[in-house]
Image (cartoon, rainbow, N blue to C red):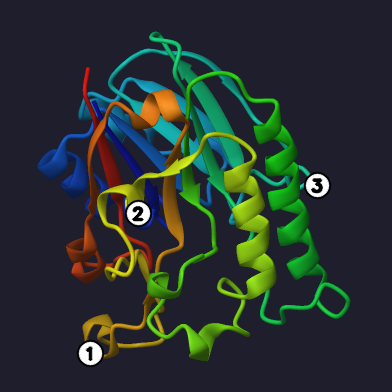
């Protein structure tokens, strides 16, 4: 089974590259973040035409939004409000084999890494803490995927020292993410298959006309698995080439393949 996570940054605007990716890679399940569309306007027909007949949506007009598209049945779904303001940032499903997939879009957190002067930063930290509380009581075999908006390791960013005070790589965010990871048997599949200090990036800013010139990337997108799910993982791929496609997202897809 191949499971993909991708912050698409508007699924309707980029539907052509989504279709291209699905035709070329043919994953079983696709988890999208930042779909930026209400459920009624989601381009479901395009996915159904490619065999993704099982669709779970949690949308919001112009902002946020998550979705799970699948070729295999999805037994149930839920939508957790880790942001505590009803923003569409989570959707979870259970597969017929009992495994859960939780798809999350963690807030970016604004520009200033100080909750007293930047409420968005505080909301981000609180979001991760609510995820941690959820994780502590989690018993089901689970795959947690999405845009975490945190690059935890020095080798997860283009310049560790340069970004220590930049939101997404600050020590306080890394500490929060470490607490989430320690709250259960989570295995970071990206680093399981590509151990640090190997370069591993999933996001490049739009500010650079050619992202390959300076390669100032960050690993903001993650797949974590509880121990029993991680034991079945056989590979993890970052599709860096998608960043050069027509009208690309600033994030690229990541995929883990699991044995049956």
Q: Position of residue 13 (x, y in %)?
A: 37, 57
Q: How many marks?
A: 3
On the image, numbered disc 2 is attached to which residue?
191
Which mark is drawn over residue 85?
3
Residue at 39% x, 26% y is 229
Residue drawn at x 80%, y 65% is: 122
Q: Is residue 130 visible?
A: yes
Give the distance between the C-alpha atoms of the residues marked 3 and 1, in whole angstroms: 39 Å
Q: Nearer the viewer, residue 195 or 30?
A: 195
In the image, is residue 62 above or below residue 99? below
Q: Nearer the viewer, mark 3 or mark 2?
A: 2
- Of the numbered discs in the image, which one, if any, rests on residue 213? 1
Q: Residues within 10 Å of mark 3 (few under 14, many from 20)?
A: few
The residue depicted at 41 percent of the width and 78 percent of the height is 205
Query: Hey, which residue is sitting farthest left in the picture?
Result: 24
- Residue 151's x, y, as percent? 49, 66
């Amino acid at each position: 089974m191949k499971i993909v996570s991708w912050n698409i940054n508007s699924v309707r605007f980029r539907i052509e590259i989504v279709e291209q990716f699905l035709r070329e890679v043919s994953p079983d399940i696709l988890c999208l973040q930042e779909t930026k569309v209400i459920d009624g306007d989601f381009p479901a027909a395009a996915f159904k035409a490619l065999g993704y007949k099982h669709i779970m949506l949690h949308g919001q007009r112009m902002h946020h939004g998550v979705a799970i598209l699948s070729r295999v049945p999805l037994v149930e779904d839920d939508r957790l409000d880790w942001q505590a303001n009803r923003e569409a940032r989570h959707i979870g499903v259970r597969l017929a084999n009992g495994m859960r997939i939780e798809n999350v879009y963690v807030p970016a957190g604004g520009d200033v890494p100080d909750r007293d002067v930047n409420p968005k930063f505080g909301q981000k930290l609180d979001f991760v803490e609510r995820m941690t509380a959820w994780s502590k009581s989690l018993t089901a075999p689970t795959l947690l995927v999405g845009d975490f908006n945190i690059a935890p390791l020095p080798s997860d960013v283009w310049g560790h020292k340069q970004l220590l005070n930049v939101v997404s790589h600050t020590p306080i965010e890394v500490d929060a993410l470490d607490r989430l990871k320690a709250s259960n048997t989570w295995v970071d599949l990206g680093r399981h298959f590509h151990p640090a200090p190997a370069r591993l990036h999933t996001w490049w800013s739009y500010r650079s006309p050619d992202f390959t010139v300076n390669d100032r990337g960050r690993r903001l997108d993650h797949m974590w698995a509880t121990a029993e799910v991680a034991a079945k993982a056989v590979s993890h791929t970052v599709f860096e080439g998608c960043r050069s496609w027509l009208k690309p997202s600033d994030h690229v897809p990541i995929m883990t393949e699991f044995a049956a």
